[in-house]
Structures are given as structure tokens and as C-alpha cells.
Image: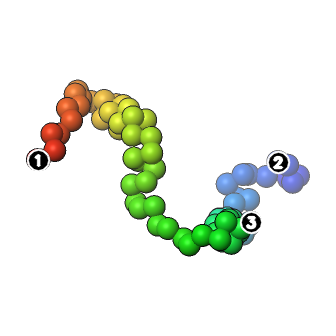
């Protein structure tokens, strides 16, 4: 059997996994960019919080989550909760 005729399922077992090294390089790059801009702007790091991106584009998050629930067979009607005074 020629190389290009091999079973693709068999090739995966002989090739080393590349996921972890790629993830480490991506993480290193992200940290480098953060540190670079902090030093460039002479700022301290500020944690934005776990829901920063949810609050940044709230309408898109609502639309995406409603669509997911509807795809699961639910009928969804959003009503804002009144804040206690």
C-alpha cells in the first residue's frame, strides 16, 4: 500500500499529539501580549471579571442563549427582573 492510500484512522495513532504544545504556545503568546501592553501603557493589571464579555455585548448573549433554548424545544420569553429599591 502506498503512503497516500493508507487508512487515515491508522495515521492518527502513529502521529504524536500536537494539542498540548500548541495550547502552551497560544497561552504564552496571550500572556506576552498582556505584559507588553501593560508595560507600554505603564498600567497595572486589572481583572475584568468572569462576566466581562457577557456584559460587554449583552444583547448578543441573550439572543444566543434564547436560540439555544429554543433549539432544545423550549419557548422563551425574557422579562427583565426589577431591581430592589
Tag 1 secondary structure: loop
- The residue labelled by disc 3 is 15
Q: Nearer the viewer, mark 1 or mark 2?
A: 1
Q: Residue 22: name its quadrant.
A: bottom right
**Residue shown at the point (69%, 60%) measured from the top left:** 12
Residue drawn at x 16%, y 44% is 83
Q: CA distance from mark 3 to mark 1?
A: 62 Å
Q: Which mark is residue 5?
A: 2
* Element class at badge 2: helix
Given residues 10 and 77, the one toward you in this image is 77
* Residue 73 visible in image: yes
Earlier in the chain: of badge 3 and badge 2, it is: 2
Q: CA distance from mark 3 to mark 2?
A: 16 Å
SS of the residue under disc 3: loop
Question: Residue 85: which disc?
Answer: 1
In the image, residue 30 above or below residue 51: below
How far across and down, in percent of the image, does residue 1 sit?
85, 53
Amino acid at each position: 500500500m502506498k503512503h497516500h492510500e493508507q487508512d487515515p484512522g491508522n495515521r492518527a495513532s502513529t502521529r504524536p499529539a500536537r494539542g498540548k504544545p500548541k495550547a502552551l504556545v497560544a497561552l504564552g503568546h496571550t500572556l506576552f501580549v498582556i505584559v507588553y501592553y501593560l508595560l507600554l501603557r505603564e498600567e497595572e493589571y486589572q481583572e475584568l471579571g468572569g462576566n466581562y464579555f457577557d456584559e460587554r455585548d449583552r444583547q448578543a448573549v441573550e439572543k444566543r442563549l434564547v436560540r439555544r433554548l429554543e433549539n432544545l424545544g423550549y419557548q422563551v420569553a425574557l422579562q427583565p427582573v426589577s431591581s430592589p429599591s
